[in-house]
Image (cartoon, grey):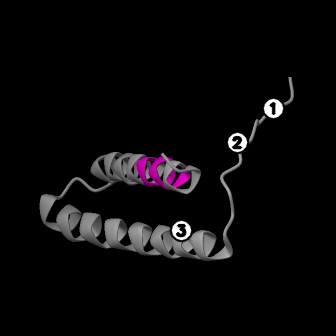
Amino acid sequence: MEKSQDWEDVYDRRVSNMVRECMVILEGLVPDDKQRAPLRQLMRRTIYNATDGLKSDLVNMGLARKQENYNFPN
């Protein structure tokens, strides 16, 4: 698999995970089903629009995926 496809696959999976986590949080914050359904749709659309735009910008810039190591202070 090409590296560009590799980072794009990782990016897509992480965005999907982020959306899923946001939906779980929304479930706990909005108890009414009638309010929750439109909010879920709005949040999902907003997140995917923003992340798709970011992904497109990164691809157009030709950036290669770089593994970051985050070391938190002890």
Q: Which residues are magenta?
A: 7-13
Counting from the top left corner in percent of width and height, residue 28 is at 31, 46
Q: Residues within 10 Å of mark 3 (few under 14, many from 20)?
A: some
The tag earlier along the polypeptide, 2 or 3, is 3
Counting from the top left corner in percent of width and height, residue 52 is at 46, 71
- In this picture, is 43 found above or below 23? below
Q: Secondary structure at mark 3?
A: helix
Counting from the top left corner in percent of width and height, residue 40 is at 27, 63
* Depth check, front residue: 51 or 73: 51
Amino acid on which disc 1 is placed: Asn
Picture quadrant of residue 24: top left
* Depth check, front residue: 54 or 7: 7
Question: Mark 2 and mark 1 in contact (Cβ < 8 Å)?
Answer: no
Amino acid on which disc 3 is placed: Lys
Image point (76%, 36%), residue name: 69
Give the residue pinned by disc 3.
55
Give the residue pinned by disc 1.
71
Give the quarter of the figure containing the C terminus: top right
Specify the farthest residue to the right. 73
